[in-house]
Image (cartoon, grey):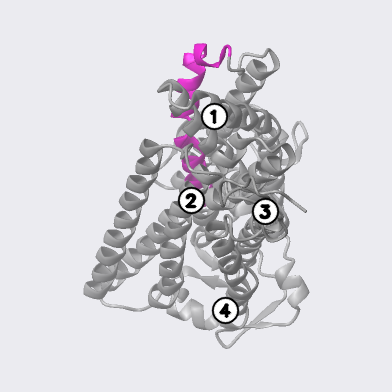
Amino acid sequence: MSPDDLALHIARFDFAWITTMHILYPPITIGLAMLLFFAEWRWLRTDDEKWYRLCRFFERLFVVNFGAGVATGVTMEMAFGILYGPFSQAAGPLFGQVLGYETITAFMYEAGFIGLMIFGWGKISRRMHLFATFNVALSSSLSAWWILDANSWMQSPDGVEYINGVFHVVSWKDALLNPDVFGAFPHMLVACLEIALVFVAAVSAWFLLKNRHAELFQKPLKYAMIALVVVAPLQVYLGDSIGLITAKQQPAALAAMEGHYDTYNADGTPNTDWKVVGWPNAANDGFAWSISIPHVLSLLETHTWSSPVTGLNDFPMDERPPVVIPFYSFRVMVAIGGALLLLAFWGGFLALRGRLSMAYIREQKWFLRATLAAVVLPYLAIWTGWWTREVSRQPWIVYGMMRVEEGVSQMSLQIALFWLAGFVVFELAVLFGTVYFLAKVCRIGPDIESPIPPDTRQRLGHIESDDDTSPEYIRPV
C-alpha cells in the first residue's frame, strides 16, 4: 500500500473514530431531556418532593453529557473540513445549509433555554421552568432531526444534481424529505429514549443495591421499566421498517448486512437462507462457512416466504460494500435489541405483580444486577447500528453519486497521523472526563436537604403577616 493510500485509510478511520465517540453523548442527552420534562411535570402535578429531588439529580448527569456532546460535536464539524474537504465543498450548497439550520433552529434555541433550566430554579416560576425544560427537550430533538436529515440525504440523495463536482439543489422538498429520513429519524429518536430509560433504570438500580436513598430511586426504576415495555418493542418494529427502506434504496447495503451473495440458488429458486453467523471466502463472492436458517431472510426483508432478495454478486465488485463489519455489527445490534426487550418484559412483569414496590424491590437482587449491567447495551447498540449504517454505504460517501475516495482530503501520511493522534487524545480525554464526573455525581448522590425553591408567582404576590417568621414563608394573596 502506497503512502497516499495509507493516508486515505487513516483519514477515513480518523473520522470513523470521531463520529463513534461523539454519538455516545447526544442520544442520552436527548432522551434525558424528555425524562426530565416528565419528572418535572409530575412534580408540578403531584407536589411530591421526590420528583423535584430526582429532577435536580438527573439534571446534573444531563449537564455532564451535554457538555461532552457539545465538545465532541464541534470537533466533528471541524473534522469535516479537515478530513473531508472535497466532500464539504461539493456538498456545501445542501449540507452546509442543513447544518446551519441545525445551529439556528436547534443549537441556539437549546442554548437559550438550557440556561433557564439549569440556573432558573427559584428565579422563575415553576410553570416557566417546566416550559424551559420542555423547550430543551424539543430543541434537542430538532437537532437530531437536522443531523439525521443530512446523513439520510447521503444515504438517499434526492433533490440534487451533481454537476462539475458540486451538488446543486433542484428541490429542497425532495432533498430534506428524502426516503431514508422517515425511517432513520424515528429509529434514532426512540433509541434516544430507550438509552435514557435504561440509563435511569441502571442508576436507580445501583442506588437500590447500595441501599442508598431507596425510597427515592424506587420510583424512577418502576416508571422506566413500565415505559420500556412500550419503547423496546417499538424500537424493534422501527428497526424492521428501516430495513425495508434499505432493501429498496440500498440493496447492496442490505446484502452486506445479511452476508447475502446469491440472489438465486443453482437450480434457479430464490435463495432465502438467513445466515446467523459465517465468514466470507477469499474471493469475496460467497461465504467460506456459515450457519443458515431457510426462508428467514425473505420473511425479514420482504415479509413473504420465498421472494428473492438481491445478492452482492449482482453488483460490480467495485460497488460492493465490505461485509464483515456490517454483517456482525448488525447482528450485535439486533441481539441487544432482543436483550433489552427481555429486560423490559421482566421489569414489566415484576411491576405488574407489585414486586417493584418499596416492600419488595430490594428483594429483586438479580433483576437489579441485570438492570445495572444492561447500562452498556444501548451504547453498544447505537455504536453497532451506526457502524452498520455507515460502512454498508461504502464505497459511496453520497450513495450512487460520489465515492469516498473522491471526498477525502488529500494529505500526507505525516499530517494524517498528526490529526489521528490529536483526535484520539482529545476524544479519550472527553470520555474519561465524562465517566469521571458521572461517577462522581452518583457517588455524591442526590441533594435531599436543601430547601425546595418557592414559586416566584407566589413570592411576588405574597402578603407578609405579623407571624411571618422566615423570609422563606410564602402566603399567596
Vertical relation: 347 (above or below) 68? above
Q: Label 1 is placed on what type of residue?
A: Leu
Using the numbered discs, state the Cα–Cα distance from disc 1 to disc 4 in whole angstroms. Answer: 46 Å
User: Where 357 sits versus 283, above or below?
Assistant: above
Q: Which mark is nearer the camera, 1 or 2?
A: 1
Residue at 57%, 55% in the rendered image: 121
Nearest to the eye among marks 4 and 2: give it.
4
In primary-sequence order, the first of circles 4 and 2 is 4
Q: Are marks 1 and 4 in contact (CB under 8 Å)?
A: no
Whole-angstrom CA distance, mark 3 to mark 2, is 63 Å
Q: Position of residue 312 (x, y in %)?
A: 57, 50
Q: For marks 4 and 2, give the CA distance.
A: 23 Å
Marks 3, 2: nearer the viewer: 3
Q: What amino acid type is highlighted by mark number 2? A: Trp
Q: Which residue is mark 2?
A: 387
In the rendered structure, which disc, 1 or 3, sits on the residue that comes first in sequence?
1
Type of secondary structure dominating the magenta stretch: helix
Q: Is residue 305 visible?
A: yes
Magenta highlight range: 359-387
* Quadrant housing residue 414: bottom left
Q: Which mark is residue 464?
A: 3
- Badge nearest the viewer, 4 or 3: 3
Q: Residue at x 54, y 29 (%)?
A: 216
Which kind of residue does numbered mark 3 sit on?
Answer: Glu
- Quarter of the rendering containing residue 43: top right
Left or right: where 299 falls relative to 67? right
Q: Residue furthest bottom?
A: 164
What residue is disc 4 on?
A: 96
Nearest the viewer among 20 and 46 is 46
* Residue 112, position as x, y percentages in the image: 59, 69
